[in-house]
Image (cartoon, rainbow, N blue to C red):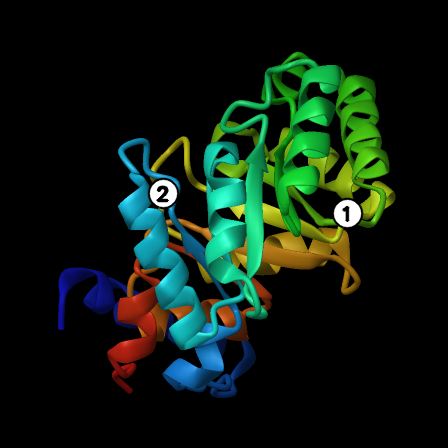
């Protein structure tokens, strides 16, 4: 068992014992899912800055073989990925305004139009972190509204919530906007801080956005046990670069 699997196991046990202490009852444990059960929840991330066409080709073949929900590729590779995924049910997810969301709304909307034209079926759209940090929530709301409008139902929209950069107050206000506007998903991102995906983060977001908005989370998800725990805690999608490892190495009980 590697260190990350150990951490995941210990984390689950700690939270389970805390819950037992508070309620006097043993809480349910997360069921360990099989590779086949996990695959359709995984977004196969191919976004490293050194990603080559050969890596995209390989990633697309892996996605088709295992039945991943989609491949996540940069705008540069959308057409290339579409050609290699033809005839499959694997989607194509494209980041917009990534990673800081600081581009103008017009620029991000132009990215969305081009991505959809080239074959994107899902969009991970970065919110304007600088506006959030400046307290300009009207700008944050307008930005997200316009991006969803431009997508026009032609691609699913996931609003990226970069939690590690936000205060508790900023988190609540940002999630209130997301709940109000209603994108298809909120993505709990750890891309800019390197933090690990945590089931408590999922539960916190779910408590504020309600049941109708999907939740995607990323951040160091490398084994089937961690993936199973996050899905059990309320996540609907997981962003992973270790997708193949997750579905081929069984979860330890």
Image position, residue 245 (x, y; %): 26, 69
149 up-or-down from 108: above or below: below
User: Callout 2: few (<14), some (14-19), or many (20+) C-alpha neighbours within 10 Å?
Assistant: some
* 134 to 29, vertically: above or below: above
Q: Which of the labelled discs sits on residue 195, or is there none? A: 2
CA separation in Å, label 1 and label 2: 24 Å
Of labels 1 and 2, the one closer to you? 1
Q: Where is residue 158 in the image (x, y as percent from the top left)?
A: 66, 46
Image quadrant where residue 14 sits: bottom left
The image quadrant of residue 214 is bottom right
Quarter where residue 148 is shown: top right
State the quadrant of the C terminus.
bottom left
Count residues near mark 1 (Cα–Cα under 10 Å), then give few for <14, some for 14-19, many for 20+: some
Side of 153 relative to 129 (left or right): right
Q: Name the residue under label 1.
A: 183
Residue name at image x 77 percent, y 32 percent: 147
Which of these two is toward me, 13 or 90? 90
**How many marks are shown on the rendered structure?**
2
> Is any atom of residue 241 visible in this view?
no
User: Judging from the image, what secondary structure is the residue with disc 2 in?
Assistant: loop
Q: Residue at x 51, y 53 (%)?
A: 83
Q: Is residue 5 left or right of residue 183?
A: left
């Amino acid at each position: 068992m590697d260190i990350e699997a150990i951490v995941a196991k210990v984390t689950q046990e700690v939270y389970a014992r805390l819950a037992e202490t508070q309620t006097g009852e043993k809480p349910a444990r997360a069921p360990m899912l099989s590779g086949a059960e996990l695959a359709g929840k995984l977004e196969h991330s191919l976004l490293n800055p050194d990603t080559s066409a050969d890596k995209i080709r390989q990633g697309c073949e892996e996605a088709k073989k295992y039945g991943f929900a989609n491949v996540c590729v940069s705008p540069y590779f959308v057409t290339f990925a579409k050609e290699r995924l033809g005839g499959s049910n694997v989607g194509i997810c494209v980041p917009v305004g990534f990673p800081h969301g600081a581009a103008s709304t017009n620029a991000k909307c132009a990215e969305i139009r081009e991505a959809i034209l080239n074959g994107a079926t899902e969009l991970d759209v970065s919110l304007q972190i600088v506006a959030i940090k400046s307290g300009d929530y009207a700008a944050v709301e307008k930005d997200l509204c316009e991006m969803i409008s431009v997508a026009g139902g032609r691609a699913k929209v996931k609003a990226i919530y970069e939690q590690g950069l936000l205060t508790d107050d900023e988190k609540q206000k940002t999630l209130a906007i997301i709940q109000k506007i209603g994108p298809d998903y909120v993505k709990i991102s750890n891309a800019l801080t390197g933090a690990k995906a945590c089931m408590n983060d999922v539960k916190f977001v779910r408590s504020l956005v309600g049941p109708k908005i999907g939740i995607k989370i990323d951040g160091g998800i490398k084994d089937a046990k961690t993936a199973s725990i996050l899905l059990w805690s309320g996540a609907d999608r997981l962003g992973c670069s270790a997708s193949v490892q997750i579905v081929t190495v069984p979860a330890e009980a």
